Structures are given as structure tokens and as C-alpha cells.
Amino acid sequence: MESRVGLSLVNRTTRRMSLTPEGELYLEHARRILGEIDDMEQLLGVCKATPRGLLRVNATLGFGRSHVAPLISRFVRKYPQVEVQLQLSVNPPALTDDSFDVCIRFARRRTAGSSPSMSRRPPAALRRTGLSGQARHAQGAERPDQAQLHRHPAR
């Protein structure tokens, strides 16, 4: 490195070595650059990263116990870095409550001319499209805002 920059970066004696002022400056900048490279690699690796973080799930009592809990158990075995908090409730909280990342609800089918109270997708569509915005949030991606969520069409 010293021959490359044309300066002495280290003071050397038979008993010790220490950085010159130029060496200190070089080290400071090298650490900053390496930190930025690490940050860039993490940003680029988000798509390939293993899911991690907290995922808060709410479901109705009966369905949650018989269907959701076994799925979560398999999910946690596959992705041990994800902590899942499952809350089963008889009286579920409002969907506007920001206490949960995923809320599983049942609703009557829409009739022509009625407005949807929530967006829904069949399981096959979820498998095709991959992770939801909330699941990507568990991986560290930016959480979608309400406006983004309401743009998804109900099927």
C-alpha cells in the first residue's frame, strides 16, 4: 500500500509499529469505504437473505388453532431466525389496528355493487406471487403504507 500511495503509512522500529498521520487518515477512510461496501452488499442481498425478525399474526380461535398454528410451527422450523407471535382471538382486533403484521379473517363473499371491506386472494395466487408485503417486512424490507395495500385488487 505504501508504494502504491507513495507515502510511509507505518513507523517501524525493531520493537514496535505505529501509524503515521497519513496512515491514520488512510485507515479512517478505508474503514468508512469497507463499511459502505458492507451496507451495499446487505442492500443487494435483501432478496436472497434468510427471513428474520418478528412476525405478529392474529387469527380466529378455531381456524387458528387447527390450521394456522401447525403452519406457523413448520414455518419456524424452516426459518428459525423469524420469531412468530400468534394471537388467537374470539373477537379479533380491527384490521386498522397496527398491532399485527398478518390478520386472518373470514368474510362473506362480495355481491355486485358492494364495496370490499378487505382485499383477499386465493391460496394459488399467493403461491404465484410469493411473499406479501408484510412478510417482506419481516425480512427487513420497508413496510408498505395503507395506500399501497389498498391498491391491490380484491379477487
Image: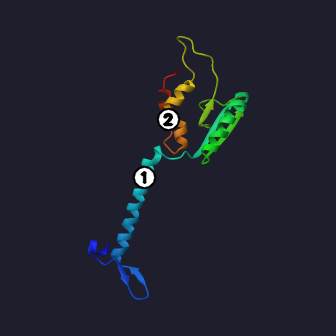
Question: Residue sitting at 52 percent across and 34 percent down?
Answer: 132
Question: Residue sitting at 43 percent across and 54 percent down?
Answer: 39
Q: Quick check: can you spot residue 97?
A: no
Q: Quick check: can you spot residue 75?
A: yes
Residue 79, position in %: x, y?
Answer: 60, 45
Crowd rating for badge 1 (residues with CA inside 10 Å; few <14, some 14–19, many 20+): few
Nearer to us of marks 1 and 2 is 1
Q: Is residue 28 left or right of residue 70?
A: left
Q: Quadrant of residue 12?
A: bottom left
Q: Quadrant of residue 109?
A: top right
Q: Quadrant of residue 37?
A: bottom left
Q: Nearer the viewer, residue 66 or 84?
A: 66
Q: Amino acid at mark 2?
A: Asp
Crowd rating for badge 2 (residues with CA inside 10 Å; few <14, some 14–19, many 20+): few
- Which residue is denoted by mark 1 in the rendering? 41
Q: Is residue 107 left or right of residue 17?
A: right
Give the answer, above or below, for where 95 lies relative to 138.
above
Residue 42, position in %: x, y?
Answer: 45, 51
Q: Amino acid at mark 1?
A: Glu
Earlier sequence position, callout 1 versus callout 2: 1
**Where the N terminus falls, by quadrant?**
bottom left
| Tally of numbered tags | 2
- Which residue is denoted by mark 2 in the rendering? 145
Badge 1 vs badge 2, beta-carbon distance below 8 Å: no
Residue at the extreme bottom of the image, as rendered: 14
Residue at the extreme top of the image, as rendered: 112
Q: Which mark is residue 11?
A: none
Give the answer, above or below, for where 2 lies relative to 67.
below
Q: Is residue 114 left or right of residue 64?
A: left
Residue 4, position in %: x, y?
Answer: 27, 71
Query: Residues under labels 1 and 2: Cα distance?
Result: 26 Å
The residue tagged with tag 2: helix, strand or loop? Answer: loop
